[in-house]
Image (cartoon, helix red, strand yellow):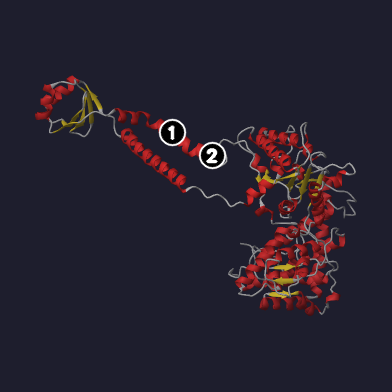
Amino acid sequence: MNSNKTQKNMPPKKPDKKTSNGRNVILLLLIIFGITYLVQWATLTFEKAPQELSYKDFYTLLKNNLTEEKISSAVKTEEKIYGSFSDGSKYTVNVPVDDPELLNLLRENVKQFDIKPPRTFFANLFYSLGPMVLFILFLWFFIYRGAASGGGRVFAFGKSRAKLATDEHMRITFEDVAGVDEAKEELKEVIEFLKDPRKFQRLGGKMPKGILVVGPPGTGKTLLAKAVAGEAKVPFFSISGSDFVEMFVGVGASRVRDLFEQAKKSVKITRKGCIIFLDEIDAVGRQRFAGIGGGHDEREQTLNALLVEMDGFDTQEGVILIAATNRPDVLDPALLRPGRFDRHVVIDRPDIIGREAILRVHARKIKMDEHVNLKRIASQTPGFSGADLANLINEAALLGARRNKDAVTQEELEESIERVMAGPQRKSRVITKAEKKIIAYHESGHALLSLLTPEADPMHKVTIISRGMALGYTFTPPKEDRYITTKGQMIAKLIVALGGRAAEELIFRQFSTGAHNDLSVVSEIARDMITQFGMSERLGHLTYGKRHEQIFLGRDLHEEKNYSDETAMLIDQEVKRLVDECYSKAMKTLARHRHELRALTEMLLVKEVVDDKEVRKLLKLHEDEVTGDSGTETDKKDGNVDVGQQKT
């Protein structure tokens, strides 16, 4: 191990200039040789083949050439004459070596006559063996030499592509990872086991063979693996699941075996453990053919090799496999069992405390104003992953630099939330005064109902500035994280979502297409309340329809209908009744506050952006008198931002 460290610390050897110059000369000669031969070959190939004449016919043409002038030129070698006719076509003829009469006729009857020596032995050898020599030199220089200098890339097609982490890749530690304290503790224990196995073996415990890290995209699975590499101080191999998949059968299984062989060798050399990090294991660990939809022989062979290496007949302690995926539902059951993956570490989206910690980690590299309140930013970003928060901090830094500020302020941070959620501002979009008025009333309806409806999420900001696909939006983040939603809170969300359409009907006595997204959200929430959460008295405490979903990606593959047509009609009736009742409540509330609705609309048309303090002042509400309670933490695209869509 010490020798390896010494070799790593040594400066890299500079390539010998003489060797590199020699290679360049060889390469230049090969190029010149190849171009010359190709030119000669192309000339002979693309020219029309010469007409081969008999000696008798040529002799007749030659005798009459003074009068007919059919032969334009002639060149004689030892046993052959070649040249061209007057029409430009070529000819060739075999003649005796010693024929004085023929030579006299050629000198007298052909104006352009010449005698050339025949090709030498080396010239014939060049044209006959040239292609073979060129091909051999090409193989030697570009394949053999490339393999020798590149660590045997060509002749190691079945070798593993895993990268051994170096000191440059080990700069990230657990101090750079926040919001996943439980996962950090699990992995810290593994690192301690590698450093001091006797501490855990004292009571008969064994080192876990595998740890499966699962979670939604962007929650920090790969970052956590980089932190393990920085903390472990043991050999750390990293590879992606797609590196095993090739078009050639057997290559993936060969690479799996070679990967574990490298890991076992490192364990014997260092006498410590070794960690293998396999990212996106679902690319190679999908469930094997079950009789439906066809199989994939290459991937299944690779998976079989992985299963045997992890817990087969010939396994060795000291090699720990850490794998990451956001699709644990598609992995093969044999891969998930204890003995292969002994621990399953779930990384979910961070809560408000985790979000604040993540923001502080990413804010270290940014010049922040001393009055920045990251806790407030964390409270406004429910459902954000670690990657979203990192993007938020970066967007804030770019905004501050664009505005020529000395430090990032709270204003840039809050605007970056809107940029991440809804996209950049589109002030160049041309909107007529009539449309702008409709948008202002629409968003005013959302904003007022968020403060006037019990158990609703209170608004933070309302604007009619176009951003992304939205013509205007009302930002209603919850004040705290919740993981259970009550029926009252869901009804409040329906009322607020219907506030835009209710305001349009109340003022203009007609509807617009701006409520398209609101109606989609309302329909989904109402149907879930009836079919999934048992919140209908007529249908009882039952769920209707079985959804087959991707666990961490949130997309429905299909829904299985397990109820009758009569029940389906009853479900539709209940959904419509629930939405109609919520719409009626929204209309009544806005009708009682028609004056405030008009005042807020006029304020929006003038200022374009209004915060919650101004709206509370308009409603004569103090902060502690706001009737809207904090809501649940939902995904940031599932209703926290109202998106008004306009007909194109």
Q: Secondary structure at mark 1?
A: helix
Q: Nearer the viewer, mark 1 or mark 2?
A: 2
| Label 2 SS | helix
Q: Is residue 527 visible?
A: no
Mark 2 — residue?
148
Q: Position of residue 202 (x, y in %)?
A: 89, 44
Which mark is on residue 567? none
Instruction: Specify whether 365 is left or right of 591.
Output: left
Classify residue 329 by image quadrant.
top right
The quarter of the picture where the C terminus appears is bottom right
* Residue type at the position of mark 2: Ala
Residue located at (73% from left, 41% from top): 267
Query: Looking at this view, is 95 or 543 the one in front?
Result: 95
Answer whether labels 1 and 2 touch (C-beta < 8 Å).
Answer: no
- Residue identifier under label 1: 135
Question: Where's residue 297, x and y in %?
Answer: 67, 32
Instruction: Name the quadrant of the N terminus.
Output: top right
Q: Nearer the viewer, residue 489 or 247?
A: 247
Which amino acid is tagged 1? Phe
Name the foreground residue: 606 vs 211.
Answer: 211
Q: Earlier in the sequence, mark 1 or mark 2?
A: 1
User: Gap between marks 1 and 2, in whole Å?
Assistant: 19 Å
User: In the displayed structure, would residue 153 be above or below residue 639?
Assistant: above
